[in-house]
Image (cartoon, grey):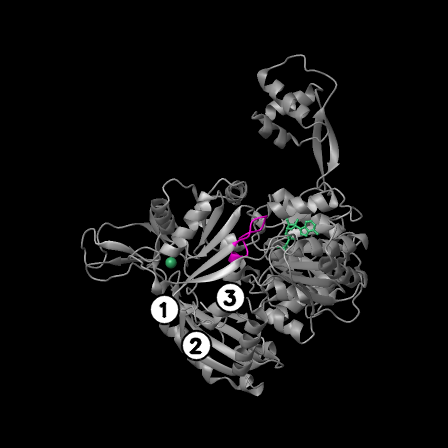
Amino acid sequence: MLSADPPEFFDEGSPCGVLTVEPLDRVLDYLAPAGGAWLGAFVEVPLGPRRVLGVVWGPAEGSFPRNKLRAAIRVLDAVPMRAELRAFLARVADYTLTPLPAMLRLATRVPDLGSGPAMRKLLYRGANLPARMTEAREKVLAVCDGFGGAGLTSGELAQAAGVSAGVVRGLVQAGALIEREAPRDQPYPRLDPARAGQSLTEDQSAAAVALRNGVAGRSYGTTLLKGVTGSGKTEVYLEAVAECLAQRRQALVLLPEIALSAEFLTRVEARFGARPAEWHSGVTLSERRRCWHMVGRGEAQLVVGARSALFLPFRDLGLIVVDEEHDSSYKQEEGVLYNARDMAVLRAAMGEAQVILASATPSLETWANASVGKYARLDLAARFGPNELPQMRAIDLRAEEMPTSRWISPSLQSAVTARIAAGEQALLFLNRRGYAPLTVCRACGHQIECSECDARMVEHRFLRRLVCHQCGASRSIPEACPSCGAQDRLAPVGPGVERLEEEARALWPEARVAVLSSDLFGTARALKEQIAAIAEGEADIIIGTQIVAKGHNFPVLTLVGVIDADLGLSGSDLRAAERVFQLVRQVSGRAGRAEKPGVALIQTSQPEHPVIRAILSGAEEEFWRSEAAQRKSLGMPPFGRLAGVVISAPALEPAFALGIELARADGPLREIGAQVFGPAPAPIARIRGRHRVRLLVKAPKSAGLQAAISDWLQPHKLKGDLRLSVDIDPQSFF
Ligand code: ADP
Ligand code: ZN
């Protein structure tokens, strides 16, 4: 859509093409507003009776007579979107088959873009005391003193003092408070890349030098930084960040579960002398605004963020680190379906930047790209310091005496008991939230399902409710079976972390037990505090879902017990083996991070299963090679390509009918050697009352998949309540 050589500036009243955030399939022509507009300028334009946000995207399309064009209302106070970001949004739109306006919405998710004034009025303590002093006035002045020279707006001041706005106004009139104009968004404190980092081991410093050289070269390159947990990957990639800052380019570090990553921010502060900018759902609106604008002006040197930080308007992005690159949360599963890890590589390639993909257990995609030389690869083989990797052992559940409704085997029990006696911590890992995954009537066998989804309700005893993990709907636990009416015959089946907690409390009544599960905490901060308390040693037994697998440091944790390693192995999911391998290795890596050696005990009923054997032996390269060989023989990713198509509607029949119509009209797909499978009911056949039908497209690697899919779908219009979404490179198949 960008022409080869568009004008850089549009004079007032001259036609220009504007991309708006409204769901229209084309760029609209407007006359440039008063003062003219730069290419890329953020503008407000009239659309019907409304005013909407847009970006000057290129020359006018010219399909509309000039004398009928409306004028853009005004240019907003923000740095114009650079050509690099406009081109990146267009490429991601093409790649993910997303309409461009939806991409623009992703890139403008900043509060009151341009509508707020650039300057605002701050109040400072004046020299005078008011002639009449009241309790309320005293409170305000005390707050002012507490903030020293920083200044606050009248609204902030009134709120902090707990008084009305009138009290603050009165103090201004009395001359006790002085008003001054100040820039609305404060710059970030400078990070100093010249400060010394830790002294690195030989391995670490070889890796750091290679990464620094890459960044100094100011060209594109992607490197897999593979190292066991605790090997110092973070320490090493912070060296690359230092180089990037020294080059006066900006750096971005993406983290999964960023809201929990207090530890990382502290490390950045220790390394560079100040905290970085943050971009994720846990920061306040004014911080988001500040981050977005400062990034655009080149005044935020380092951003630490969640996946959407990839769409920030960097002035000159030189490095993107994707930490825990295998993490499935990098894939956005709603709205624009993109994988931030892959799009990071795309953005870097378009902007002469470096990418570092860090992981102890890389995704098969990344492993394969490194083994064919598309990505460079650096390995950190050993943990930092004297501590060894944990010993891994299987507990064969077939040989254990396990009473029903018990999940901790006698062998695991005695190992935990020994750790507690030694004053150390044990972690019991079960990747299932709630109390029990299933509630069954013992009289008639009925299972309680969500009324809106094709999914079972999960009992959450902590909340005293049954919850649907698909749509979030919840209901109280009924006393009578909704099917046969029998009283008090509903029983929980299977374990969740809450039930495991009950078992642990019964086995170790004296021990302090802490449960870490995302749904048990109202806020990220509460969860963060709990994690910090555990790290301080304020628990003997930790029971957790996969959030414990993610990079937290628990120094006195020496035993990890995996309750059910088989969970997930039986699924038909393409990545089932890969996921189990990654998760169990990651969780096991939590054991023995400080001085004491660790042990990981893996409960399984199939110790001879190849995945379990690979987990235990640590023969990683072998595991990846055999996974890769299997996928290759099936033409599956990363050796072939997939796209998922989900059609949904309130009724099943029209969704299926469209699916059949599409499957029959597969000409454009066959032309590129692709096959279409389905339609079939999706694994979760109904969500939020909508029936879901799935098609799967499988194509050879080199095929022009997106173009073929567009040609294939284009003739079929969506009638009535039908919705269709395409997921390129799907991660999950729900
Ligand atoms: P990873 O990211 O691979 O899990 P980290 O970078 O978090 O590893 O390092 C693990 C721990 O070891 C951290 O507490 C880190 O500060 C420490 N560490 C790693 N390398 C060094 C080093 N060269 N000097 C001092 N401490 C180090
Ligand atoms: Zn539901």
Give the CA distance from mark 3 to mark 2: 44 Å
Residue type marked 2: Leu
Residue identifier under label 2: 658
The chief SS type of the magenta part is loop
Task: Name the side, left or right, on which 304 lies relative to 589.
Answer: right
Residue closest to the far top:
131
Residue identifier under label 3: 615
Give the CA distance from mark 1 to mark 3: 44 Å
Question: In the rendering, at what x and y percent does residue 659 appear?
Answer: 43, 77
Question: In the rendering, at what x and y percent does residue 33 appear?
Answer: 74, 54
- Is residue 588 covered in magenta? yes
Q: Counting residues from the N terminus, which is met first, the one under dot 3 or under dot 2?
A: 3
Does the rendering let one see residue 162?
yes
Of tags 3 and 2, the one toward the viewer is 3
Task: Name the side, left or right, on which 710 lies relative to 87.
Answer: left
Q: Which mark is residue 651?
A: 1
Q: Give the residues drawn in magenta, as a range.
A: 587-598
Element carrying mark 2: helix
Check the picture and name the quadrant holding the N terminus: bottom right
Q: Counting residues from the N terminus, which is met first, the one under dot 1 or under dot 3?
A: 3
Task: Name the side, left or right, on which 682 lies relative to 83.
Answer: left
Quadrant assignment, res 308: bottom right
- Give the crowd class for mark 1: few <14, some 14-19, many >=20 residues within 10 Å: some
